[in-house]
């Protein structure tokens, strides 16, 4: 399993996929380790997770450099992922006691009644490469805090991220077998999901990948959490702070070279501010510097691989053929050329509603703009999608934002911001964007099962 670095096309890391004996031993260890782990008091589990955070933070510089080499994110932004991972981990540590506390339905004479959240057993996390730590931590930390054992299978593009998790848990003193890593190819990933020692699958990836996971997991009726694709919409209302909207939306669409499940792609702009908004976006996009992600001056790195860049170029050509109008000249970005993962950002104006950019997920630095005439039309356009991960509005009217948000089919609704996961809020998708929930106190519900205790008290 070779990780080809998008930086220079060379093999950055190579790992042998786990053999049958290693898979079997890993599953056995996880099952054996989980029973004593669930009996460890929650306060001790939380203290150990905090030690994990300390170990992770101390390795921030190395983690950042590895990220750039493995998936191409500019080194100047690497600290964001380290900080975000710690923010989420520490929030989930802080709310664990409340989230996992017994639920009391109220007194009943002669009885003691409560509902306890018990761990599921072994959680199998299958994480994606585009935010390799932020995605994995969403399920790994709360699963462990809840008393589960965890097996992490990371993307073949970012295998070192899984190994860094294991290294930090070992430094924290986590008992052997409670957290393990497997480097797996697709058939063996399915094999692990089918194994009766696995009790839950947390998957982040494509819609096609999610369907494959769901089909396999359905054979055993185990729980599945799916965070899948997106083609996220935003609406710039007539009363928006246009300068603020430009800054936010350009960043939300092009950060990480557009390789974000909740990155902005469909931009609906009220006709009264359309010209000013699009002109400002074009000016700001042209300020990006496409280059070597290890150069601190680079603000736009390559996409993850040449094949991905080729797919994005094909999608761009299809959108343009359907009537979308490109406004960025590729030659403005000297490194952008076919046959490489270096790709210029693009903004498509007058994108027809049925064009690729307004219907499909383009996992790259591309966004489409469409003029709308009213709030009602914006709502209709935003809902006209098989996806529903996030959506956002820029407006000065909070009441209008709430009223419009209530009509939009989405897991998260933003006002005057975008592309951010607040760990205090549930992270969910609707429609083809997924099912289940991570983060917040609600996230613990999917990593535990309720068990009712109904005790008749006798004298």
Image: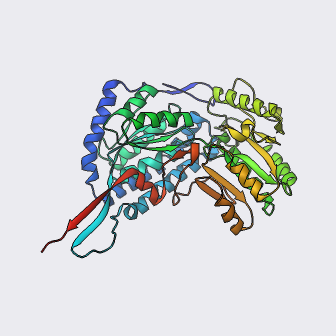
Q: Nearer the viewer, residue 60 or 38?
A: 38
Q: Which residue is located at x 27 percent, y 35 percent? A: 28
Tell whether 440 sits left or right of 231.
left
Q: Which residue is located at x 80 percent, y 33 percent? A: 322
Note whether residue 446 is visible: yes
Tell whether 358 sits left or right of 286.
left
Note whether residue 206 is visible: no
The quarter of the image holding the C terminus is bottom left
Q: x and y percent of residue 32 in the render?
A: 25, 41
Vertical order, 37 against 107 (above or below): above
Q: x and y percent of residue 79 in the render?
A: 57, 49
Q: x and y percent of residue 151 in the render?
A: 38, 39
Vertical order, 6 against 173 (above or below): above
Q: x and y percent of residue 8 in the render?
A: 63, 27
The number of callouts visible is 0
Tell whether 52 sits left or right of 209.
left
Q: In which quarter of the image is residue 348?
A: top right
Q: In which quarter of the image is residue 397?
A: bottom right
Colouring scheme applied when the structure was drawn: rainbow
Vertical order, 136 against 414 (above or below): above
Tell whether 433 sits left or right of 202.
right
């Amino acid at each position: 399993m070779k990780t080809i670095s998008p930086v220079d096309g060379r093999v950055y890391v190579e790992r042998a996929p786990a053999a049958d004996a290693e898979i079997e031993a890993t599953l056995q260890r996880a099952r054996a380790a989980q029973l004593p782990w669930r009996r460890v008091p929650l306060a001790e589990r939380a203290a150990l997770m905090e030690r994990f955070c300390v170990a992770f933070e101390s390795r921030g510089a190395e983690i950042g450099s590895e990220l750039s080499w493995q998936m191409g994110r500019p080194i100047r932004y690497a600290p964001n992922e380290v900080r975000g991972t710690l923010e989420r981990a520490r929030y989930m540590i802080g709310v664990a006691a409340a989230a996992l506390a017994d639920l009391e339905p109220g007194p009943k004479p002669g009885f003691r009644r409560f509902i306890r959240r018990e761990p599921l057993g072994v959680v199998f996390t299958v994480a994606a490469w585009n935010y390799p730590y932020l995605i994995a931590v969403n399920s790994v930390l709360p699963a462990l805090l809840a008393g589960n054992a965890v097996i992490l299978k990371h993307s073949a593009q970012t295998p070192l991220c899984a190994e860094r998790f294991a290294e930090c848990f070992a430094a924290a003193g986590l008992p052997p077998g409670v957290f393990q890593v497997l480097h797996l190819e697709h058939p063996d990933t399915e094999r692990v999901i089918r194994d009766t020692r696995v009790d839950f699958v947390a998957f982040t990836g494509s819609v096609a990948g999610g369907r494959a996971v769901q089909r396999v997991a359905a054979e055993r009726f185990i729980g599945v959490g799916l965070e899948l694709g997106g083609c996220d919409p935003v609406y710039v209302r007539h009363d928006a702070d246009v300068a603020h909207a430009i800054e936010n939306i350009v960043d939300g669409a092009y950060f990480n070279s557009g390789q974000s499940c909740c990155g902005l792609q469909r931009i609906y702009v009220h006709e009264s501010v359309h010209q000013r908004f699009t002109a400002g976006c074009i000016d700001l996009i042209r300020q990006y510097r496409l280059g070597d992600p290890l150069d601190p001056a680079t603000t736009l790195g390559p996409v993850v691989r040449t094949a991905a860049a080729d797919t994005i170029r094909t999608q761009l050509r299809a959108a343009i053929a359907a009537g979308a109008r490109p406004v960025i000249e590729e030659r403005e970005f000297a490194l952008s050329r076919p046959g490489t993962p270096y790709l210029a950002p693009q903004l498509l104006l007058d994108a027809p509603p049925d064009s690729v950019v307004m219907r499909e997920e383009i996992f790259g630095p591309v966004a489409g703009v469409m003029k709308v005439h009213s709030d009602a039309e914006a709502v209709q356009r935003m809902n006209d999608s098989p996806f529903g991960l996030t959506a956002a509005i820029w407006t000065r009217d909070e009441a209008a934002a709430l009223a419009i948000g209530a009509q939009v089919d989405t897991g998260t609704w933003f006002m005057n911001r975008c592309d951010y996961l607040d760990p205090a809020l549930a992270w969910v998708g609707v429609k083809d964007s997924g099912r289940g929930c991570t983060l917040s106190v609600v996230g613990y519900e999917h990593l535990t099962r309720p068990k009712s205790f109904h005790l008749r008290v006798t004298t």
